[in-house]
Image: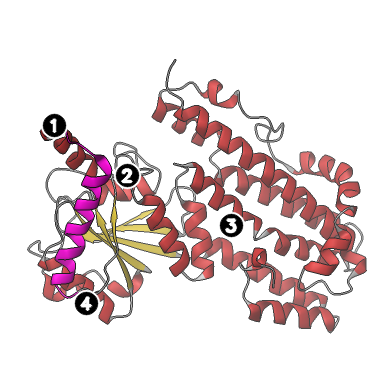
Amino acid sequence: MDSSFDIITEEEVQEIKAALQDGDLCKATEKLSESLKEIENAPLNIAITGESGTGKSTFVNAIRGMDDEEEGSARTGVVETTKEPMPYPHLQYPNVTVWDLPGIGTPNFVADNYLQSVEFSRYDFFIIMSSERFKQNDILLAKAIQAMDKKFYFVRSKVDSDLLASQKRRKKTYNEQNILNEIRDHCIQSLKEGGIAEPQVFLLSCLDLDKYDFLGMQETLEKELPKHKRHIFLISLPNISLPVLQKKREALRSGIWKMATLSCAVATVPIPGLSVACDIGILVKAMINYRKAFGLDEPSLEKLANKFGKEVSELKSVIKSPLVLQEINKELVASLLARGAAGGLMVVEYAASNIPVLGSMAAGGISFATTYWMLCGFLKEIAEDADRVLRKALESPV
């Protein structure tokens, strides 16, 4: 199967294909609808833990694209502020929850029964944070998580503070990369001495999440998460760097054929007007989701402008797609569909030969091709706009 279709499992492909070949269009449509819902609604629970004072709450906020002072953010402070596991749902993707766990070693959460106390089974993976070297409690926790067959990752936080201190002390010999390597090597060595084989340590600044090892950590999680969890993880990431935007584009593109195939299946049902209504519904929902994922909706643009000291109008000035700043509704999409059928015809032959579940469904070919063509085009436009907007936000004042 083409790698662009890896958002769906081989088992799902075979089930949908069998239903189509048997002429059971209702079953095929139902399977496709269920698969789309599973992708959109897959729960993801991320646990942030470690000793108190390591910046856990700030990281919880940062990975949700929030500042510490925003309403709904995790409480932060110089002392331990988390007294029990606290769930913080993502503002735009409520099925993604980042859990701020109490610091290990605090009176109510000692190492011996920590995982039981925080109900470890609810989390998909753990991030163990430390702002210095990793200590015995961190090592004990990692071993316990490993014994329970869960994934864990070490994050060394506050490296920006270490770099600033080194810069003041080593005015002549300061070298950022050398210092980062020293910090990483020291952390790895302490973990190995504690009995952790081949530990991975990611260096981060929660105040500047796009710097240092965040991209490497994101790529590691992407590889190790199950497919349906991987998709929602990528889509929910804050738009902090150009590589993150590219990953989102790839993740969203991988789901287009499924929506187009659903449109195709509905098109073969002999009910007047059903196919057009389905196509419009699919396109409206997908286009709104794309705009939200790339942070080009009005609230996200305002937040980005405030973060970088820009005017919203300045960011909007680099948006080229006429669709991004319009209200995406049924009327708009219906007008686009009327113009889109001709472009859709151009990919019918490609679709029939490359999409794994279409077979000989000629009756739905135009519907498939139009939906596929329009979503690919809109995704390309909005991804390029997101790229330009982020570059504009990152520009230094002249």
Tell me the tag on residue 144: 4
Image point (19%, 52%), residue name: 183
In this orientation, does residue 311 appear?
yes
Residue 288: image quadrant is top right
Main SS of the magenta part reads: helix
Where disc 2 sits, the SS reads loop
Q: CA distance from mark 1 to mark 2?
A: 33 Å
x and y percentages locating residue 74 in the rendered image: 28, 47
Residue that appears at 15% across and 30% down: 171
Q: Is residue 271 magenta?
A: no
Q: Amino acid at mark 1?
A: Lys
The secondary structure type at the circle numbered 3 is helix
Query: In this figure, which residue is indicated by the disc labeled 1?
Result: 168
- Mark toward the start of the polypeptide (2 vs 3): 2
* Pair 1/2: label in front: 1
- Mark 4 to mark 2 CA distance (whole Å): 29 Å
Q: Are marks 4 and 2 in contact (CB under 8 Å)?
A: no
Are the residues flagged by discs 4 and 3 in contact, CB closer than 8 Å?
no
How far apart, in angstroms, are the residues tagged by discs 2 and 3? Answer: 27 Å
The residue indicated by pointer 2 is 73
Real-space Cα distance between discs 4 and 3? 33 Å
Magenta stretch encompasses residue 190 = yes
Residue at position x 66%, y 63% in the image = 4
Kindly identify which residue carries mark 3. Answer: 251
